[in-house]
Every structure is written in structure tokens, then in C-alpha cells.
Image (cartoon, rainbow, N blue to C red):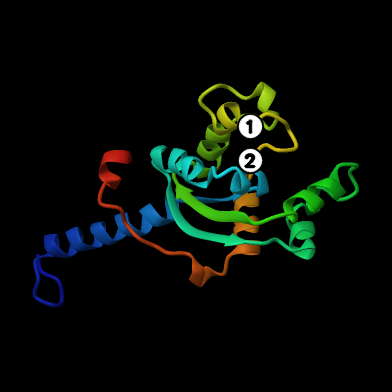
Amino acid sequence: MRTGEGRPATAFLCESFTLYKEVFHFMAQEQTLIILKPDAVQRGLIGPILTRLEQRGLKLVGLKLMQINEDLARKHYAAHEGKPFFPGLVEYITSGPVVVGVIEGKDAVQVVRNTMGATNPASAAPGTIRGDFAVEIGRNLIHGSDSPESGAREVALFFKEEELVRYERSNERWIRE
């Protein structure tokens, strides 16, 4: 059997399947926002924290150093508005430079959350970012989206689509099935 272009149908099917796999691979990748908070930046922990996330097989597709203004902080923490700790969240996240990033991978939200550890560092397991580096709940180094939906909303708050880079790592086949 041949296609209308005179090529064997098997060649056409192989090309179509390869394209399908590539499209599906990108669609299957979940994105999550991370914020290395002012305490992480001030303590010089940017490198070690990003390294732990990359060592889990996650991929950085967006990264920037920035100062979050009050308006952006209020939008980011909107779910907590009206709660007694809301003003403190806004005040702290705007108190110094932060590193914001977009992490991509299969089940990225849950993998990042497991790697971060419990919100309260006193309860965080050893081997997690918070368990190894943080001491107090108010200085717990890192924010990670709590769901794929929050991840999509938060990524859109901090990054324009053109700021995210799509690329394939040469070691992907050693990380993912």
C-alpha cells in the first residue's frame, strides 16, 4: 500500500507515530512554579536547591531573579487573602530578591512538593530541601504550586509564554520510560 505521495504506507505511519509521541510527550509534561524565597537567596542556597530539583529528573524551562512587588504578591497569595497571616506573606515575599522558575516533568507538582518537604521545617523529613536547610515555618526557603491548576495559574502570573523554553534533553530516555 502506498500513500498519495508514492511513499510506502509504513513509512508514513512511522513518521506519524513519531510526531504523535513528540506531541504527547510535551502534552504529558506538567508545569509547576517554584519561588526560592528571600531567605534562600540571602543564604546562598539557589544552586543547591535547583540542583536537587534537577537531580530528581525535572527540567527547568523558565528562570529569573526578580523583586516581587506588592500587587504581584497579593495576586499570587490571593487564596489566603483575609487570613491573619496574609499580610505577613506579602511583606516577606516582597522583602528581598527571589528566584522564580518553571519546572516541567511528569507529575512535576507532586515531585517538587515531595522534594521540598513539609511546610513546617520541624516536620520535614531529612533529605528534603526544608528538612535539610530550613528551621522555621516563616523562613522555609521555597514555594511550590500545590496542584496542576495552581501551577498553570501561577506560571501565567510570573512568566509570559515566550519566556518559557521548550527543549529536549539528551538524557530524557534515561529518566523517563
At a point 72% along the width and 31% down the height, the residue shown is 136
Residue 160 in picture, x, y percent from top left: 57, 69
Q: Is any part of residue 177 visible from this angle?
A: no
- Dot 2 and dot 1 residues touching (CB under 8 Å): yes
User: Which disc is residue 141 wearing?
Assistant: 2
Q: CA distance from mark 2 to mark 1?
A: 7 Å
Residue 130 in picture, x, y percent from top left: 60, 32
Q: Secondary structure at mark 2?
A: loop
Q: Please give the residue where the numbered disc 1 appears in the rendered image.
A: 134
> In what quadrant of the picture does the N terminus appear?
bottom left
> In what quadrant of the picture does the C terminus appear?
top left
Which is more toward the observer, 115 or 2? Answer: 115
Occupied quadrant, residue 120: top right
At a point 75% along the width and 56% down the height, the residue shown is 94
User: Which disc is residue 157 wearing?
Assistant: none
At a point 52% along the width and 55% down the height, the residue shown is 102
Q: Is residue 91 above or below residue 124?
A: below
At a point 75% along the width and 37% down the height, the residue shown is 138
Residue 112 in picture, x, y percent from top left: 53, 39
Occupied quadrant, residue 106: top left
N-terminal label among 2 and 1: 1
Farthest residue, direction bottom: 5
Q: Secondary structure at mark 1?
A: loop
